[in-house]
Amino acid sequence: MITSIFFYGIGNNVSESDSETYSARFPRVRFDYAKQIAPSFYVGVKSFLDGFSFSDFDPMGKLANEDYLGKEGGWNVGLGPSFIVDSRDNPIYPLSGWFSETYLLRFGKPWGGDFAYWEIGGDLRHYQPLSQSVIWASQLATKITSGQIPFFCFALVGRKSLA
């Protein structure tokens, strides 16, 4: 897959005028497996496999002229446990209930990746019927990373370095 991606920089002091684009080519495989161990409670494993290569940097842009970890591309491989609580009435088209997933991923050399870091993530969703034809759906998601994080794996909104 080849796609064009916008880049604004990293940190809290970026603006719309910092916008530049670059091209990314990557195979991507995501695999999650979870086993139910109690009603509405699942324990599983989550895995990530991405092989990135980048091109078409703006010659006057930040990516071409500044040192960002991962701009040369590489393999990003992560594996770790996940914990899920799911009380939705239907996993495909929920009308009511809760869904929550928490995971801890280790990226890096143990799995054949080029970047060594940890990621803790969470996803909390709630579905509430307001009437026969209206469902209120809300979601709160978080991603916390620490270590040698390639620029393309930071959360897309906000960044606070823990290192």
Image: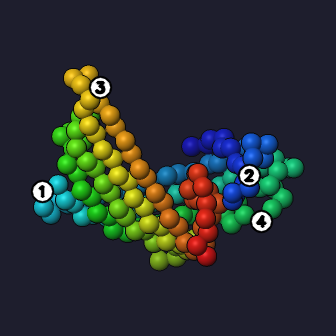
Q: Compute the Cα span from label 3 to label 2.
A: 38 Å
Question: Alpha-carbon neighbours of circle 1 within 10 Å: few (<14), some, or many (≥20)?
Answer: few
Task: Give the structural element (helix, strand or loop) at label 2.
Answer: loop
Question: Alpha-carbon neighbours of circle 3 within 10 Å: few (<14), some, or many (≥20)?
Answer: few
Is 131 drawn above or below residue 48 in the view shown? above
Q: Going by the picture, which residue comes out furthest to the left?
A: 39
Task: Give the structural element (helix, strand or loop) at label 1.
Answer: loop
**Label 3 close to label 2 by CB (< 8 Å):** no
Task: Give the structural element (helix, strand or loop) at label 3.
Answer: loop
Residue 85 position in % (x across, y down): 24, 56
Which kind of residue does numbered mark 4 sit on? Asp
Q: Which residue is mark 1?
A: 39
Which kind of residue does numbered mark 3 sit on? Val
Quadrant position of the N terminus in the picture: top right
Q: Is residue 55 visible?
A: no
Q: Which residue is mark 2?
A: 14
Displayed quadrant of residue 101? bottom left
Q: Going by the picture, which residue comes out furthest to the front?
A: 130
**Residue appearing at x 43%, y 53% in the figure:** 141
Q: Which badge, 4 or 1, is on the more N-terminal residue? A: 1
Which kind of residue does numbered mark 2 sit on? Val
Q: Compute the Cα span from label 1 to label 3.
A: 28 Å
Left or right? Give the position of 20 relative to 120.
right
Q: Which badge, 3 or 4, is on the more N-terminal residue? A: 4
Q: Nearer the viewer, residue 23 or 61?
A: 61
Q: Going by the picture, which residue comes out furthest to the right?
A: 60
Question: Alpha-carbon neighbours of circle 4 within 10 Å: few (<14), some, or many (≥20)?
Answer: few
**Residue appearing at x 39%, y 45% in the figure:** 139
Question: Alpha-carbon neighbours of circle 2 within 10 Å: few (<14), some, or many (≥20)?
Answer: few
